[in-house]
């Protein structure tokens, strides 16, 4: 059976263009309804119970995130569709959710639909969207989605002690659980976690400064972390790292 979908976009041309692309190139998807606002989308979800929502972010009278406030659980997948590559995209990436930018690239659309279709056939509730909603409600203590094999595990950012890059993968070390190997590069984590006191102290190391216990000058500089790990600081990052540590001590 095809996967039922709802398109939410305040622009008629945008809805028609996306619906046409889906009909021509995504045969596993059947568009059962369209909506031009958050209110219409709520009514459409209640009436049609779609398995997938193509959701525009910026709309008059409310953005796509506000739509999520009306549901206690999320028995549907979401592909965000937006012309804005801004803070919203960062929040979506943080929760490991899927998005495509306008103007729509056909290959990106097909890739997003293929990923979501597989998940729809293997789950009953969308943890990605639930976590995205919770993060927007509680931004000071978010959870981040970590792709590990066929799963995405959600962990509190504050529990991450350090990240160690290995090619296009990253080892994540925690205060209270075994390490995880995730299919994201260290550069991606550096961008996503910067505002939570994570800094790059070495080509392969990203450290949560909240877990730094001490600094020694051995071999140019070494950080001792709360779990007993020690991480060397590269020479070119030494002064920046020490400055950031001083800033945390100053305001703590």
Image (cartoon, helix red, strand yellow):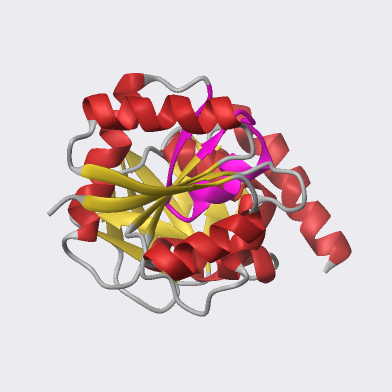
Above/below status of 194 relative to 108: below
Question: Can you give x and y, in whole percent of width and height, for residue 59 in the image?
Answer: 70, 43
* Percent of width and height locating residue 157: 54, 64
When the figure is inspected, residue 11 is found, relative to residue 78, above or below; the finding is above
Closer-to-camera residue (139/228): 139
Observer-nearest of 30 and 67 = 30
Task: State the residue in front, 121 or 5.
Answer: 5
Q: Residue at x 29, y 71 (%)?
A: 178
Q: Is residue 222 visible?
A: no
Q: Position of residue 16 (x, y in %)?
A: 47, 29
Height in image: 174 above or below 13? below
Task: List the single residue furthest toward the left.
Answer: 1
Residue at the image point whose x is 58% and y is 50% from the top: 91
* Residue 8 appears in view: yes
Segment colored magenta: 81-102
- Residue at 63 percent of width and 71 percent of height: 141
- When asked about the image quadrant of residue 108, the answer is top left
Which residue is at a point 60% across and 54% down the rendered structure image? 216
Q: Tell me if residue 83 is in the magenta stretch.
A: yes
């Amino acid at each position: 059976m095809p996967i039922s979908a709802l398109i939410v976009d305040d622009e008629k041309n945008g809805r028609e263009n996306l619906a046409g692309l889906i009909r021509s190139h995504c045969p596993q998807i059947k568009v059962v309804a369209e909506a031009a606002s958050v209110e219409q989308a709520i009514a459409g979800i209640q009436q049609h119970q779609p398995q997938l929502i193509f959701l525009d972010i910026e709309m008059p009278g409310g953005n796509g995130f506000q739509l999520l406030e009306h549901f206690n659980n999320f028995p549907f997948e979401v592909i965000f569709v937006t012309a804005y590559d801004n803070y919203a995209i960062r929040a979506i990436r943080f929760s490991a959710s899927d998005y495509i930018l306008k103007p729509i690239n056909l290959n990106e659309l097909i890739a997003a639909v293929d990923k979501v279709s597989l998940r729809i056939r293997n789950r009953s509730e969308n943890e990605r969207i639930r976590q995205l909603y919770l993060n927007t409600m509680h931004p000071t203590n978010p959870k981040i989605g970590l792709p590990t094999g066929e799963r995405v595990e959600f962990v509190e950012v504050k529990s991450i002690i350090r990240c160690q890059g290995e090619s296009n993968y990253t080892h994540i070390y925690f205060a209270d659980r075994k390490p995880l190997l995730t299919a994201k590069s260290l550069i991606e984590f550096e961008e996503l976690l910067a505002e939570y006191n994570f800094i790059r102290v070495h080509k392969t190391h990203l450290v949560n400064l909240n877990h730094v216990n001490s600094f020694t000058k051995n071999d140019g500089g070494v950080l001792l972390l709360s779990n007993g790990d020690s991480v060397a600081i590269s020479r070119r990052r030494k002064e920046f790292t020490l400055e950031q540590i001083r800033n945390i001590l100053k305001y703590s």
